[in-house]
């Protein structure tokens, strides 16, 4: 009886929560939007570790699913393209902050293979945004010594964007300490399939034997082989959705997941610190007992 | 006099259970008016912490966890969920202390055998049981018991219970990749598709889970169903596994229903 009563209370609180949450989220979004306009969301040049965080316990690799650009634009009365622009700007700030805090690798899910199903105008806008941003930020990446890698299928993306990607990767390939990985036209299942094909090819060429294929060898064939730390320690997903959405499936085996209800363009410094504090409070066991 | 009181208590208990069951079925009728998940997966985390919290002896946490599992299965199948997958024992768990591993294996053997009892939940709900994992890593006794249950329930088709034991997802993926490579080796490797890997996955006997629930508040996958949960909704209640109950299941399904319409709209836009 008690559990049934608590069920009905759950149902009631769920209904209340559903009504209140969208309202409070909108309030948060507009408030933070003002802060962005006033340029107070990040403190440039800060290297001091914020209170509540330990530098030695920073994750080496943080991944992010940047969800919520379109909803943010809708709530702010802006165009979808402006939402994506705000999202791109937020990514640069996010990566900068992570690197300043000592995080070596940042991966971002910029465009999923499923996203090809969106409206053509939006897809073209995104492709053009990627190209514009990468091109305009090459000098920034070089001055900050950030290595940029792009992982994904890349067969369907426009030639001009492909050219810019190659140019950016080439211009930044020598940098070792900070690595920004952009997943464009990426899917975790495609990554695994790609590794599978690579293994078959090497097997046919006599480079590996079937009995040598194990998890370590397999991991080296994934697209994340561009980094020494292919498995993120922390994955952040914004906008309240609690799904992986086919991002880095293999690599997320032991990753700590952090879901934030905040929309991506509003994911400011305080939110990043909140995610890192949550990460540092977790006990990671990797299947064993500590 | 004492006997009379005892009989009365038993009678009252029976009445309360019937009221509880009736109320639960009414609640499920209400919930079923919205979309229901077809497949739920559980990471049953927190048994040992529960034993510590309740000051119980070692091993009692896992026993309490098994009772919680049986209750959860009953709720799921009553609600009409077709498949339930549980993460019983990971390959990584073999690295735990030998006495703990042995105790878990003994408990597993006892509980696997009990599934064949006439009064067990398997017969009540017509469950087909699958044991998913690298079963060669198990002792002969446990493996034999698992195979016996799979054989005995092979004709059941109402609902499915997938028990992941000696399992981890990266191992499942590598085995599936090896199998699909062997079948395609004599042809052009370009012909290997996602569906080739998928059909060689041990979990291909069921559709991908709609919801993955991990108890004890930890928010990570721990190498469980990485391939299959790409689109699953994740839910991590703070309750330790033996504390998991009806309200957590209801909350998970309500959240699923709330995001389901948005998710379906998103899928349709991308089609």
Image (spheres, coloured by chain):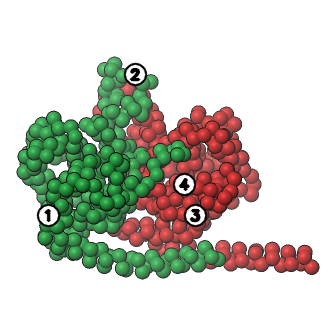
Task: Please give the label number shown on residue A81.
Answer: 1
Q: Are dots 3 and 2 on a single chain?
A: no
Quadrant for the N terminus of chain B, please: bottom right
Q: Which numbered marker is on residue B45?
A: 4
Q: Nearer the viewer, residue B36 or A226?
A: A226
Instruction: Mark 3 vs mark 2: give the one in front.
Output: 3
Classify the position of the C terminus of chain B by image quarter: bottom left
Rendered location of residue B82, percent (x, y): 54, 59
Q: Earlier in the sequence, mark 3 or mark 4?
A: 4
Give the labeled residue for mark 2.
A209
- Write down which chain is painted red: B
Residue B201 rendering spot, x and y as whole percentages: 46, 41
Q: Position of residue B159 (x, y in %)?
A: 58, 56
Q: CA distance from mark 4 to mark 2?
A: 38 Å
Do discs 4 and 2 belong to a common subunit? no
Q: Name the side, left or right, on which B185 lies relative to B3.
A: left
For residue B244, the mark is: 3
Q: Secondary structure at mark 4?
A: loop
Distance Cα–Cα, label 4 vs label 1: 43 Å
The residue carrying pointer 2 sits among few (fewer than 14), some (14 to 19) or many (20 or more) residues within 10 Å by Cα, namely few
Q: Position of residue B26 (x, y in %)?
A: 59, 77
Chain of the residue on which disc 4 is drawn? B
B139 sits to left or right of B118: left
Query: What is the crowding at mark 1: few (fewer than 14 residues within 10 Å), some, or many (at least 20)?
Result: some
| Between A229 and B150, the one nearer to me in the picture | A229
């Amino acid at each position: 009886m008690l559990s049934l009563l608590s069920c009905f209370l759950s149902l009631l609180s769920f209904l209340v929560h559903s009504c209140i949450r969208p309202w409070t989220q909108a309030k948060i979004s507009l408030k933070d939007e003002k802060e962005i306009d006033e340029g107070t969301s990040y403190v440039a040049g800060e290297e001091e570790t914020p209170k509540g965080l330990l530098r030695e316990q920073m994750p080496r690799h943080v991944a992010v699913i940047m969800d919520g650009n379109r909803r943010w634009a809708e709530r702010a009365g802006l165009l979808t393209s402006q939402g994506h622009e705000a999202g791109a700007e937020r990514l640069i700030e996010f990566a900068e902050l992570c690197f300043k805090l000592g995080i070596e690798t940042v991966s971002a899910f910029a465009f999923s293979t499923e996203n090809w199903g969106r409206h053509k105008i939006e897809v073209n806008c995104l492709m053009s945004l990627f190209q514009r941003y990468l091109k305009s930020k090459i000098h920034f990446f070089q001055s900050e010594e950030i290595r940029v890698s792009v992982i994904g299928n890349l067969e369907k993306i426009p030639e001009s964007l492909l050219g810019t990607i190659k140019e950016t990767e080439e211009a930044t390939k020598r940098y070792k300490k900070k690595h920004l990985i952009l997943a464009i036209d990426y899917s975790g299942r495609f990554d695994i399939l790609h590794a599978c094909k690579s293994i078959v090819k090497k097997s046919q060429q006599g480079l590996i034997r079937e009995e040598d294929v194990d998890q370590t060898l397999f991991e080296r064939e994934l697209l994340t082989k561009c980094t020494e730390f292919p498995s993120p320690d922390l994955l952040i997903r914004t906008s309240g959705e609690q799904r992986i959405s086919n991002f880095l499936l293999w690599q997320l085996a032991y990753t700590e997941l952090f879901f934030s209800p905040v929309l991506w363009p509003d994911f400011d410094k305080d939110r990043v610190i909140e995610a890192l504090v949550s990460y540092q409070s977790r006990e990671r066991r990797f299947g064993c007992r500590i | 006099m004492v006997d009379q009181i005892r009989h009365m208590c038993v009678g009252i208990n029976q009445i309360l259970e019937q009221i509880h069951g009736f109320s639960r079925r009414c609640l499920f009728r209400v919930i079923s008016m919205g979309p229901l998940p077809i497949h739920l997966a559980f990471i049953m985390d927190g048994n040992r912490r529960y034993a510590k919290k309740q000051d119980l002896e070692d091993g009692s946490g896992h026993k309490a966890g098994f009772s919680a599992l049986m209750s959860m299965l009953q709720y799921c199948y009553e609600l009409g969920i077709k498949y339930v997958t549980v993460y019983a024992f990971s390959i990584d768990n073999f690295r735990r202390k030998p006495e703990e591993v042995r105790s878990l294996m003994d408990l597993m053997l006892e509980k696997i055998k009990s599934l064949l009892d006439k009064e067990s939940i398997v017969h009540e709900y017509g469950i087909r049981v699958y044991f998913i994992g690298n079963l060669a890593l198990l002792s002969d006794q446990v493996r034999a018991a698992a195979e016996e249950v799979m054989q005995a329930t092979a004709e059941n088709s109402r609902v499915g219970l997938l028990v992941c034991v000696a399992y981890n997802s990266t191992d499942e993926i590598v085995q599936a990749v090896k199998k699909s490579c062997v079948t395609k080796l004599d042809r052009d490797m370009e012909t290997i598709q996602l569906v080739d890997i998928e059909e060689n996955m041990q979990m291909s006997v069921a559709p991908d889970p709609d919801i993955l629930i991990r108890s004890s508040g930890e928010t990570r996958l721990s190498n469980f169903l990485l391939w299959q949960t790409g689109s699953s909704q994740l839910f991590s209640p703070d309750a330790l596994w033996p504390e998991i109950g009806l309200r957590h299941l209801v909350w998970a399904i309500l959240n699923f229903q709330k995001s389901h319409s948005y998710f379906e709209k998103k899928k349709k836009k991308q089609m």
